[in-house]
Structure formats: structure tokens, C-alpha cells
Image (cartoon, rainbow, N blue to C red):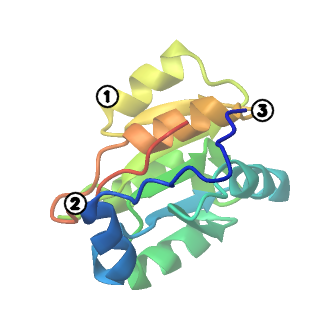
Amino acid sequence: MIQREANSPVAAPPAAARKAIADPALKPKPRRILSISAFAEDHDSLRRILSDPAWRIAEASSCHQAIQFLCRDRPEVILCDANLPDGAWCDILSQIAELADAPSLIVTGWEAGDALRDQVRALGGYDILAKPFVADQVRHVVGTAPHPRGTGVAAPATA
């Protein structure tokens, strides 16, 4: 850890940083994420991994709940379990495919191999994430997912 002498001055942040701190309108908006899974552990894990204020997570436990959510709000990223009680990830993808501001779809599952990745990408999804979730991998994949057209939101930095 670097220590400074008691009398040494602390450098002021650059003007742009001071302006962003002073003007909340210049701060980046949190990236909205919808987590779709029947398993509370998935939601808990993603909430813990994406706990930074740069992310805002909503949860659904079925296709039906997810579609209801999508009728009133539009996330930039959807993390969807491969198998849901009332459908599958491809049902969600078919619902969002025609939207002008379609979110990026990331499929999660215990068997997240190359075959699933190829299928997800061939049908218009973004990527896959294997369970159990690895924090750095989740942050990277979610952080690099393309933003829907027209949102103009910058992705938060990934660690």
C-alpha cells in the first residue's frame, strides 16, 4: 500500500471527473439485466457477482414472468437458463428477436458447451455461461454484450 506524507497535497480529480461528479445527468446509467431462472441460487449468485452499482438486475422465474417483464421494461441484457418450467431460452429469443431494441441474450446452463454456444449464436443470441458461475467470466460476458440499438449506454468496466 502506498502511503503519502502527512503534508503532501492530494491531487484534485480532472475537470471532466469533477463535472461528472457534480452533474448526475453525466453519470452513466446502470446497465439493466434480466435474470431468468427457476432457481433462486442462480439469481442469488448473479446478484452477488453483479453487485456493482453499474448493474441493475431484475428477476423472473419462468418464460411467462419474463415476457410480462419485457412488456413493461426493456433490459439491455438477458441471462436465461437453458431450461425453464414453462419453456426454454429459444422461446425468450423468439419473443425478443423482432424488437428494434432487442436485448442481448446470454444462455446459462450446466451443460454449456460448444454445441449450445453454436446454437445460441446461430439463432441470434449473444453467448453462453456455464454453471456454476465464475465471477470474472460473468462480468466479462455481460460487460461485452452489445447494447440494443438506440440506447447509447456505455458498458461498465469489467474487472
Residue 42 appears left or right of 57: right
Q: Residue type at mark 1: give it.
A: Ala
**Quarter of the figure with the C terminus:** top right
First reached walking from the N terminus: tag 2 or tag 1: 2
The mark closer to the camera, 2 or 3, is 3
First reached walking from the N terminus: tag 2 or tag 3: 2
Number of the label disc, if any, that sits on residue 98 = 2
- Tell me where residue 60 sits by quadrant: bottom right
Q: Residue type at mark 2: give it.
A: Glu
Q: Nearer the viewer, residue 36 or 156?
A: 156
Q: Residue type at mark 3: give it.
A: Pro
Label 1, on which residue? Answer: 122
Label 3, on which residue? Answer: 132
The mark closer to the camera, 1 or 3, is 3
Tell whether label 1 touches label 2 (CB within 8 Å): no
Q: CA distance from mark 2 to mark 3?
A: 31 Å
Compared with residue 110, is residue 46 higher up or lower down, i.e. above or below? below
- Tell me where residue 53 sits by quadrant: bottom right
Q: Nearer the viewer, residue 132 or 89?
A: 132
Tell whether label 3 touches label 2 (CB within 8 Å): no
**Quarter of the figure with the N terminus:** top right
Tell me the element at label 3: loop
Residue drawn at (42%, 32%), measured in percent from left and top? 120
Most distant residue in the bottom direction: 72
Residue 35 appears left or right of 74: right
Most distant residue in the top direction: 114
